[in-house]
Amino acid sequence: MGKLALHWKILIGMVAGIIFGIMASQLGWQEIVKDWIKPFGTIFINMLKLIAIPLILVSLIKGIVDLHDISKFKTMGIRTFVLYIATTVIAVSIGLIMVNIIKPGDSVSAETIQQLTIANGETMKEKIQTAAVSQPSGPLQFLVDMVPDNFFKAASVNTNMLQVIFFAIFFGIALLLVDKQIGKPVTDFFTGANEVIMKMVDMIMLMAPLAVFALLSALITEITNPDLFVALGWYVVTVLIGLVLMAGFYGLVVALYLKKSPVFFYKSIAPAQLLAFSTSSSAATLPVTMERVEEHLGVDKEVTSFVCPLGATVNMDGTSLYQAVAAVFICEAMHFDLSFSAQLSIIITATLASIGSAAVPGAGLIMLVVVLESLGLPAESMAIGLALIFAVDRPLDMCRTIINITGDCMVALVIGKSLGKLHTPKPKNLGDNYPEVA
Ligand code: ASP
């Protein structure tokens, strides 16, 4: 077991967790799993989240200083932004094409709608309220929200990552501009702190196989009505096909632009993907995503530490694809006609909604409200529509989070290549070979 690669260990943990979860459900052990197994999964996620904010802060500042030149930062920033928007628009378009070909909404009977509405109605009212609170009050509100008025307040809430990123970039640029001699102790501090945090990631990852076992077995025992999953089969299939196509698109870019094998790409980031699946959170996965991109894909630190944290919060290809499919599906199921131009408008709203979604479980569903509202779906239909898809949201969230982080890895690789900032991967300091480096 000691020599087995990390992704295999995590995979074994996942499969064992699913099997154990099914067994536990049959045996009526739900309470035992909740009290004695789930906490280990929760501790693991908490530990990953614990280092997410310090990691973003330290690595972004270090990454910017390592660029040595403000114009390089500008080039990297513009390229990252353009690529993030481009991949998101491609994802939404794939989602729209798939949902129009498969038309999953047609297969939902009035009976299913009624059944699911009763099952999930109350929870949906809360979600719509949450979305209403998080909705911008003016066109520039998203810019205002990005700038914190108090650093400590921003750093104390994990969903405020964009504010921490703003501070880190601001600080990094200022550090780049001060006299090198004066800035040196500060730079040295962040270099050292970065190493320490990466070591913490290694240590946490030792727990990953066991933690995913706990997370998945708990999740399985919490599933209340598996029949609902079947009722929404075509919707689930549509989202999944879209996500697979998106994964294929990344592979194509890796093969054509980077001249690297897609197998190498996917093998290198597999532990991060498995973790994304198990935690449903790009933010919790971020420390591992960064480690894989830098150490295994060979992208230089200054690129990784800028592109990945930003991507975790703003680039969500899987989420935007899902939002496009879900929006059209709900409208179809509710017999709400969508014109071609309304469908096109989804490209813009789903892109913005995915940027606005926090990198935590279920955030995509909340921001879906924004997309549905912009389509003019009446509030009553919206509540029923959301209740309809709620039953299958968690498994889809797990899958779309994989694509969310894969997109970030692909963009980091492309930016790295375009700036000549790739190195031969040298996996060191890693969770999977921790005993050798310890
Ligand atoms: N869970 C997703 C993420 O963290 C966001 C979402 O689609 O709900 O990337």
Image (cartoon, rainbow, N blue to C red):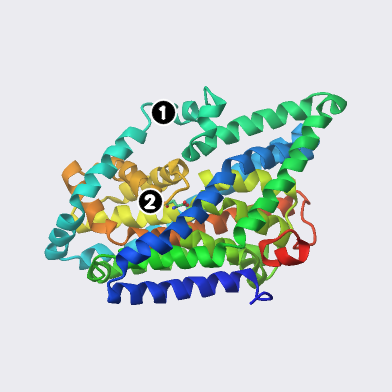
Secondary structure state at the residue bearing disc 1: loop
User: Where on the picture, by quarter, is residue 31?
Assistant: bottom left
Crowding at dot 1, Cα within 10 Å, few <14 / some 14-19 / many 20+, comes out as few
In this view, the residue in front, 22 or 176, is 22
Q: Position of residue 402 (x, y in %)?
A: 50, 60
Any part of residue 64 in sight: yes
Secondary structure state at the residue bearing disc 2: loop
Q: Which residue is mark 1?
A: 139
Mark 2 C-beta to ligand 1 under 8 Å = yes
In this view, the residue in front, 346 or 399, is 399
Any part of residue 426 in sight: no
Q: In the rendered structure, which disc, 2 or 1, sits on the residue that comes first in sequence? A: 1
Residue sitting farthest toward the right: 181
Residue sitting at x 70%, y 39%: 75
Viewer-side label of 2, 1: 2
Quarter of the figure with the C terminus: bottom right
Q: CA distance from mark 2 to mark 1?
A: 24 Å
Q: Which mark is residue 362?
A: 2
Question: Is 227 left, or right, of 398 in this rendering?
Answer: left
Amino acid marked by disc 2? Gly
In this view, the residue in front, 425 or 196, is 196
Residue sitting at x 77%, y 55%: 422
Q: Position of residue 124 (x, y in %)?
A: 24, 48
Residue sitting at x 58%, y 72%: 9
Amino acid marked by disc 1? Pro
Crowding at dot 2, Cα within 10 Å, few <14 / some 14-19 / many 20+, comes out as many
Question: Is 257 left, or right, of 33 in this rendering?
Answer: right
